[in-house]
Image (cartoon, helix red, strand yellow):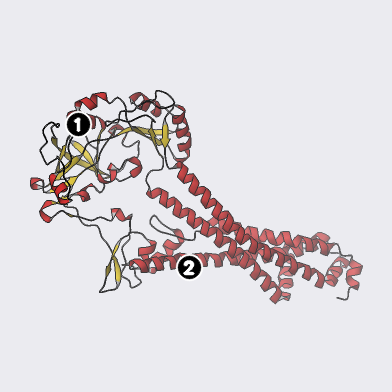
Amino acid sequence: MRFGDVLRLCRQNLWRRKSRTILTVLGVIVGCCSIVLMVSLGQGINEQNEKMLKSMGDLSIVTVYTNGYAGPMGGGGSSEMGDTKLDDKAVESFRAMSGVSGVTPMMNFPYNVTARAGAGGRYIYDYVQIMGIDMTQFDQMGYKLVGGEKPVKKDQVLAGEWFAYGFMDTLKNGEQRTSTRGGQYSSCTFDQTTGQCEEDQDEDPFFDPLATQISLTTGANYQGDQYTMNMYGGGGTGGAGGNTAGQSENVTFDVRASGIVAGDYNKGYATSDGLVMDLQALKELAAKVDPAAAKKATAYNQVLVKAADLKSVPEVESQIKALGYETSSYEDMRKSLEEQSRAIQLILGGIGAVSLLVAAIGIANTMVMSVTERTREIGIMKALGCYVRDIRVMFLAEAGAIGFFGGLIGCVLSGLISLGINVVGALYAGGMSGGMPGGMVSGAGGGSGDGTGGGTSIWTILWQAIVGGENVTRYSVIPWWLFLFAVLFSTLIGLLFGFGPANKAVKIPALDAIKNNE
């Protein structure tokens, strides 16, 4: 028989027993939907884990330190494994390693610092964190600028992304401007009039850090600004410009922010709320504050090493540890989350596979019944000279068709259910924050509570539920290969469980089959 004849007979035979065929296909649909949706939920968990890790910053950063004591200037001691100081020689050895794209020492200024800005020092930011890095490695380390440019002069620094929001207005009883930290954190205020939770918006800072001169005050015994201590009920000997007898002189100097660096805690907390200076300039500042401590400091307390990519992180850590240093990174956390996600997917996939197994038994039962009912037909076909292989192919085609169409319809149905899960999740979260997209799109605008989400159409919500996005939360994720796998697997299940009945059909003797009265 030609292939077209096989398909025609397959259609006729399956349609001859409509109810049984439909019920068998329905079983395959349920099994296919189960396994696709279960795996998609696992994929959704995996996607959320990946976004959580990305929100933590650059995952390719490895922090290097020693077991020895680090002095106030970052002077390192000796490791338990030997004399392994984090000095310039160690930094050069890290840069020579394979898989390393950038290396910079990181030194945190160990003394209290107060920043002032505005006329008469009206705006005050106490306990400012200042970090020093090698500015020649700025691009290699993956630091990003939100605005401005890198420092080129000694009195120039980089302001952290939210540095300007740390200032208080001394003329307004310590008032501060609020920020939602670039939309990373969702916050809202309940409006009793409308009954909706309106999303908080960033307020403009008191001043533009790129256009305002900043005055810094510090000292070896400096305790902070007197205004801040009085405001919070504290005491102390420090002051805006004074010092107590027997203590070192405070140092006051002016700086200008040439740029604003993007916040990334993996590259130092100062990138968020503090100031970033060139390493040499910070060493000179520390020498002015406490010359004795500066002379004793011969090593760094930390060095940041950037791997070329995520895959290179384990190799880079291994090379560094071989030299006797200690390292820390998010690699262990990333691997742990991947293993957990993989385990969840296997468990959910196994649950769905049980449903598909039940459907496969249904296919086998249908094919066995079909062979039993068509015994005389098989005998007549053999008597007319039909090849045995054609009879086998005909029954296998019927079983495969049940699996194929069941898998195809199951994939379409599971795709719609997955879309519904994501949209309902967005609606629910949006209702909690005042609008539909407020839940699916973090920081995209609180929404108006009327289903429009502050200008975002329902079609945009549907599109985001399907393809995802940078700030989109999807609970069910079905990659294209999962659809393909589900259809092929369902078809294979049909062929596999139809092979036994097909072999039974070809083994029936022609004369016995013709004499069969059933």
Of pointers 1 and 2, the one earlier in the residue sequence? 1
Q: Is residue 10 toward the left or the right of residue 424 in the image? A: right
Q: Which of the numbered marks, if any, corresponds to residue 18?
A: none
Q: Position of residue 478 (x, y in %)?
A: 52, 59
Q: Position of residue 257 (x, y in %)?
A: 19, 41
Quarter of the picture holding the N terminus: bottom right
For label 1, the residue is: 285
For label 2, the residue is: 420
Q: Secondary structure at mark 1?
A: helix
Q: Is residue 456 visible?
A: no
| Residue at 16% from the left image edge and 47% from the top image edge | 229
Q: Secondary structure at mark 2?
A: helix
Query: How many tags in the picture?
Result: 2
| Residue at 33% from the left image edge and 73% from the top image edge | 450
Q: Position of residue 463 (x, y in %)?
A: 43, 63
| Residue at 38% from the left image edge and 47% from the top image edge | 56
- Of badges 1 and 2, the one in the foreground is 1
What amino acid is labelled 2 in the image? Gly
Q: Position of residue 395 (x, y in %)?
A: 76, 65
> Which residue is more in the foreground, 33 or 232?
232
What amino acid is labelled 1 in the image? Leu
Examine the rendered structure and indicate whether residue 15 appears above or below residue 301: below
Examine the rendered structure and indicate whether residue 66 appears above or below residue 419: above
User: How crowded is the residue under tag 2: few (<14 C-alpha within 10 Å), some, or many (20+)?
Assistant: some
Quarter of the picture holding the C terminus: bottom right
Q: Is residue 409 visible?
A: yes
Examine the rendered structure and indicate whether residue 373 appears above or below residue 176: below
| Residue at 45% from the left image edge and 52% from the top image edge | 49
In which quadrant of the rendered view does residue 396 lie?
bottom right
